[in-house]
């Protein structure tokens, strides 16, 4: 398994000296900036925080090793305090130059940004996993075990047909079997529960079509009435404050977004609403209830940033549908 050190004797050849074994740590570099989502073809220069958080499940493979994580500046709060990361580096020219002088046993690159692919391939290492640059075309190519993941990433039909969970695909890129390992969040919120239900209304800029209509949120609040206390999404400009807010809620109603993954990492009950993006990629979790849009659209999941039909599928998830699931959950 990647990340497991070799056992070697400290002393040999003497019958009077016991054989003492020690674990030899390996140097591992994980490159996950969030500039390109691992299983989506889009590349952008703003950080997909949810993608970075989900990638932390890989750390279970490297618990005994020295792990360096290169990431976007916005994602640092998601990695700070992580017990399995020894060094967090922001993606800056100085840090890139530093990495180019170092040696690693394993480099894992999960970015498809051309410059980052080139960087990953140029670093002195024994093993390379994930995405790299094809010298002939300059386009992303994959390491030995990552071709299936690359196909899902680059071909829309494969993305729609995929039934493997996100972590299952992720682990397979390293030639490993996923056994249910979850995300690892280092931050420990200090807030106590003060709301029954949190409304996680915002979505990222890459897929605005994932948003549930504003009127539906208002109608759900009316249905809840005085049965439960409700709090709308807070601290959007402060990631630590945002995690504190999620931790203050018993349950979260959310679109497919960072909040969904944070809530699960914080052991909250979650109702996740899906339409344009595939719910099949979610890792199984006893705290998660998924509602998929009942819209009769062959294009679902379109994995597009805009609705091509002009009739967004998310509107077909009714407030009453969500309220019934919420009642069962609470």
Image (tube, grey):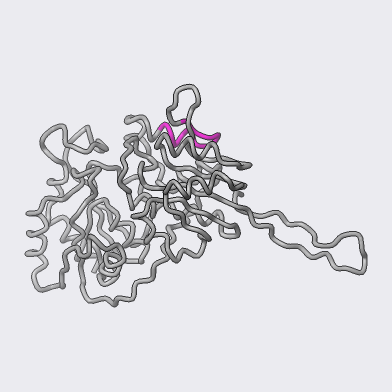
- Number of numbered discs present? 0
Q: Compared to 273, does 305 lie above or below?
A: above
43 or 156: which is nearer to us?
Answer: 43
Rendered location of residue 323, percent (x, y): 15, 61
Direction top: furthest residue = 136
Q: Relative to residue 282, is residue 299 drawn left or right?
A: left
Magenta highlight range: 141-151
Q: Relative to residue 169, is residue 155 drawn left or right?
A: left
Rendered location of residue 330, percent (x, y): 23, 69
Rendered location of residue 310, percent (x, y): 10, 35
Q: Relative to residue 190, is residue 118 drawn left or right?
A: right
Looking at the rendering, which quadrant does residue 215 occupy? bottom left
Q: What residue is rendered at 10% in x and 54% in y?
A: 216
Q: What residue is rendered at 18% in x and 35% in y?
A: 297
Residue 121 is a magenta residue: no
Q: Relative to residue 269, is residue 87 drawn left or right?
A: right
Residue 147 is a magenta residue: yes
Rendered location of residue 232, percent (x, y): 16, 64
185 or 271: which is nearer to us?
Answer: 185
Q: What residue is rendered at 35% in x and 66% in y?
A: 266
Q: What residue is rendered at 49% in x and 33% in y?
A: 142
């Amino acid at each position: 398994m990647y990340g497991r050190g070799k056992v070697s004797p400290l002393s040999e050849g003497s019958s009077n000296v016991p054989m003492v074994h020690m674990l030899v740590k390996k140097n591992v570099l994980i490159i996950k900036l969030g500039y390109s989502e691992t299983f989506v073809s889009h590349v952008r220069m703003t950080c997909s925080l949810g993608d970075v958080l989900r990638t932390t499940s890989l750390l279970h493979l490297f618990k005994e090793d020295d792990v360096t994580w290169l990431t976007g500046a916005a994602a640092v709060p998601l990695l700070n305090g992580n017990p399995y990361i020894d060094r967090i580096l922001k993606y800056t020219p100085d840090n890139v130059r530093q990495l180019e002088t170092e040696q690693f046993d394993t480099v894992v690159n999960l970015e498809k940004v051309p410059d980052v692919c080139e960087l990953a391939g140029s670093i002195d290492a024994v093993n390379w996993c994930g995405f790299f640059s094809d010298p002939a075309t300059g386009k992303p190519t994959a390491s030995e075990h990552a071709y299936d993941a690359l196909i899902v990433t680059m071909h829309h039909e494969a993305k729609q047909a995929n039934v493997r969970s996100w972590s299952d695909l992720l682990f397979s890129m390293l030639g490993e079997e996923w056994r249910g390992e979850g995300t690892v969040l280092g931050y420990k919120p200090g807030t106590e529960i003060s709301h029954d239900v949190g409304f996680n209304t915002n979505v990222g800029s890459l897929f605005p079509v994932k948003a549930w209509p504003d009127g539906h949120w208002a109608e759900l609040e009316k249905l809840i009435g005085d049965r439960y206390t409700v709090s709308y999404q807070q601290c959007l400009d402060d990631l630590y404050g945002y995690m504190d807010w999620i931790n203050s809620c018993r349950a979260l109603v959310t679109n497919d977004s960072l909040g969904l993954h944070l809530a699960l990492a914080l052991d909250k009950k979650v109702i996740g609403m899906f339409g344009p993006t595939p719910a099949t990629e979610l890792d199984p979790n006893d705290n998660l209830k998924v509602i998929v849009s009942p819209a009769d659209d062959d294009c679902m999941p379109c994995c597009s940033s805009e609705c091509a039909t002009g009739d967004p599928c998310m509107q077909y998830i009714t407030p009453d549908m969500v309220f019934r699931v919420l009642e069962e959950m609470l």
